[in-house]
Amino acid sequence: MTERPPIWFYYGAGRLADLAEYARVVLQPEFYNAAELSYLAGRGAQTLGYLSLSEDQGPPAPWQRRERNPDWGGAYVHVEHPQWVEHVVGKARAALDAGFAGLFLDQLNVELTFPEDVPHLLTLIAAIRNEAKPAYLLANRGFGMLPRLAELVDGVLFESFSARWTDDGYAPWPPDVLEFHAQIAEQLLQLQVDLYALDYADSPGLTDFAVRRARQFGMHCAVSDRALSRV
């Protein structure tokens, strides 16, 4: 019997039979109901609900900053705003109550945008951890919060470890970035967390490069497109 792949990331809807082939799947909570989540759980697939911690795609709200993410258009937020904390922790609880087995914590790289928010983001993650116990928490990057972050989550994803999407398609990172990422990966190997990579590619050669390189650093690599529309 073939061992099922460890993880997949899918931001579409449906495709239950395909998703059930994975040990762990990251999904958008609004696209799946309790019955669908129960179906996946019954077939041994652990479901993780997506949760953004430092950006808001919703309507104008008091926690939003004026600045927006140039790639996706979401508003950056004041992470420490009490209403934002309440909003995010509430969404975490709602996802778990709906049947998700854990959470995928995204938009953690505040050290690149608002470094003063790093301690506030750690406080928010700790609040989610407290609310979600014993659910599985997977953090996307968040390297500016290491090693404390590793004490609050069960796994760390290195998104775009080897390959990336660009205005002209998909490509490997240049050598200096690959070396920098390798240094971070070496640090991650010292932590007591599950390690994964997510890369973006549209050719067998680039896909193989990403998978092989992740394996060298103890990571299973999922390779998809920019919209995470493949299953």
Image: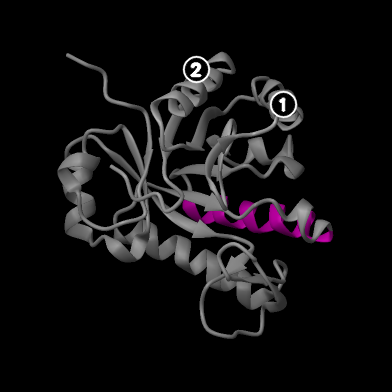
Q: Is residue 157 magenta?
A: no
Residue 93 higher or lower than 73, as above or below = above
The quarter of the displayed image where residue 5 is located = top left
| Along the line of sight, the residue nearer the viewer: 149 or 23 | 23
* Mark 2, secondary structure of its residue: helix
Kindly report the secondary structure that dominates the magenta region of the rendered protein.
Answer: helix
Please name the amino acid that badge 1 sits on.
Answer: Pro
Task: Give the percent coordinates (x, y) of residue 24.
Answer: 35, 37
- From what the image shows, is residue 53 above or below residue 135? below
Up-down relation of residue 20 to residue 175 (above or below)? below
Q: Which residue is mark 2?
A: 212
Question: Dot 1 surroundings within 10 Å: few (below 14), some, or many (20 or more)?
Answer: few
Q: Which residue is situated farthest in the right direction here?
A: 116
State the image coordinates of residue 64 (x, y, percent, origin top left): 66, 78
Q: Disc 1 and disc 2: Cα gap in Å?
A: 16 Å
Residues 89 and 163: in front is: 163
Find the magenta span and give its range: 116-132
